[in-house]
Amino acid sequence: MKLIADIFRKKENKFDHIISLGYNCETSFKALKYFRFEEAGLFNWSYSHSINELINALNNFDSICTGGFEYPNPLWECKNTHIRFHGKANIQLYMEQPVSEEIIESDRKELVERMAYLKEKFLNFIRNDSSKLFVYKIRDNEITDASTNALLNALINLGAQNFKLLFVYQTSCGNVTNDSDIMLFRSVDYFAPDDDVTNKKYRHNGWNRIYDEFGVIEPKGLIKKKKYKFDYESHIEV
């Protein structure tokens, strides 16, 4: 069994933080399973319909989650940016009908408060001097110089400091491009289905190879097991 201490050793590419930009929850879920801890981030448990949707949100940062939410089960959709976010309630509640108005309103209220906090944290975080690796899982049809450069520039325009941007794509795309000083490209064998990213049958699709290469400096304090609330199975322990 891999010891937690071993996770943080013998990695040449270490960062203070590894943070997901989406496009969905697989990026964060695989990091959580690998490192056995999670650092809360604005886009950790979100779904973007396209890279342009994420870029637009970053370029209009104040608009994120400030215009209210639509409620297409089981995620909440930001009316301004159309990015979807998980509420805190167990997702199983939203897979069953009917869901009480009290549960829905409580979940919405919590989401509004949480996103306001995470937006402020995100801005402070990207602008500080700590070393950061942003990870974006990119769809096959989005891999262009224009789209990758636009995402990079959106981060820079927000004041991002001391970071690299890692794009993860499917191996079937072939060798996409070479790394630059700030943009990196790595592949996994395939992406898990969007609505089933926590299924154990997809555990060996190649993300561990990435996190074997890119590590985090060992966090302070204890690493605890926690409930992963946003699963399509029942209460997966991580």
Image (spheres, helix red, strand yellow):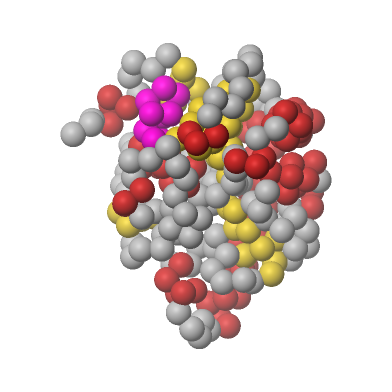
Which image quadrant for residue 78? bottom right
How many dots with numbers? 0
Q: Can you say whether 212 is above or below 202 in the image?
A: above
With 230 as the anchor, is 61 left or right in this view? right
Quadrant location of the N terminus in the rendered image: top left
- Residue depicted at 43% across the width and 29% down the height: 210
Q: Which residues are magenta?
A: 206-214
- Residue depicted at 33% across the width and 65% down the height: 234
| The magenta stretch spans residue 210 | yes
Residue 91: image location, x then y, percent: 46, 67
| The magenta stretch spans residue 89 | no
Residue 18: image location, x then y, percent: 51, 32
Do we see residue 109 in this rendering? yes
Q: Can you say whether 58 is above or below 8 in the image?
A: below
Say which of 53 and 40 sits in front: 53
With 30 as the anchor, is 224 left or right in this view? left
